[in-house]
Amino acid sequence: MTPVDALARGERLRPGARVAVVAPSGPVPEERLAAGLDILRGWGLEPVVAPHVLDSHPTLGHLAGADRARARDLTEAWCDPTVSAVLCARGGFGAQRMVDLVDWAAIRAAGPKAFVGYSDVTALHEALAVRAGFAGLHGPMVAAGTFLSDPTTQESLRATLLEPESVRTLAPETARTLVPGHARGVTLGGCASLLAADLGTPHGRPSARGGLLFLEDVGEEPYRLDRILTQLLRSGWLDGVAGIGLGSWEECGPYEEVRAVLADRLGGLGVPVVEEMGFGHSPTARTVPLGVPAVLDADSGTLTLDVPALR
């Protein structure tokens, strides 16, 4: 299988840049959206809310409006030449339902832009990588509680968007070695359950071979994490992965039990593994660039990018 390749990066944001906010997944609380938009304005950006961000699906309360409307919002925001970045309002569930309705040909033609989100947005990061060849940012959503409340989370995203050369090394104090060593590759990953759910789909990434894989999840008990990771192993998707960085496992049970599953399922791959790297569904959610060549040092618990996340 072809190794994971570096992807086309969008341009860094400048003061006054217009950034579109879309809701590809779950419904968005209006008051939390307003608070997130104020943070973006405080950075000197001009947020533009897509037409269907505050919609609710007529019968399925876990969705932010109809699938086609959510897909159209993403397509139109990306293809608007006045928009410099596309930020997701929240996760939840729904990206898988609309991902095949996005006009990927139009997005490819529009070129790369900064795209921010995590959790359910993992499905869109994978689609952008495979269908468009574009890099993304595994980072906090505009209406998410962590983004609204945690200064470190906010600063990590702000610096990545506006001063990407200043955050080429991710070195959280919490990081610990699970399996020692160094590895070079291109970053990819996100929510483990979403990556497993992409297996077997028509446009799913065929393999993580040669990549630096970043994994996290929320609300998955240890036996379910075991199932998810075992599925990735049995499918061959993890064959040849270069290294692994692990984030948060909120509401997944006692961490010693989670850690035992991670060590059992990933330790046998024979590649460096770093745990507790401070990204994902945690009280602090640092931004991790995806699609960028980098070095993972499991001994020091650091990720160092070869180039800034944005041009």
Image (spheres, helix red, strand yellow):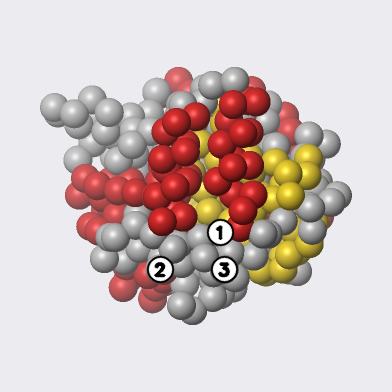
For residue 86, above or below residue 11:
above
The answer to whether residue 294 shows anywhere in this view is yes
Using the image as rendered, state which of residue 110 and residue 2 is in the foreground: 2
Task: State the image coordinates of residue 130 (x, y, percent, origin top left).
Answer: 41, 68
Residue lying at 46% horizontally and 55% vertically, measured from the top left: 233
Quadrant where the C terminus is found in the figure? bottom right
Measured Cα–Cα span from mark 3 to mark 2: 12 Å
Measured Cα–Cα span from mark 1 to mark 3: 14 Å
Q: In the displayed orientation, state which residue is furthest to the left.
A: 59
Q: At label 1, which amino acid type do we have?
A: Leu
Q: Which residue is mark 1?
A: 188
Q: Nearer the viewer, mark 1 or mark 3?
A: 3
Q: Nearer the viewer, mark 3 or mark 2?
A: 3
The answer to whether residue 103 shows anywhere in this view is no
Dot 1: element: strand
Residue lying at 40% horizontally and 68% vertically, measured from the top left: 206
Task: State the image coordinates of residue 61 (x, y, percent, origin top left).
Answer: 23, 25
Q: In the displayed orientation, state which residue is furthest to the bottom.
A: 2
Q: Which residue is mark 3?
A: 240
Q: At label 3, which amino acid type do we have?
A: Gly
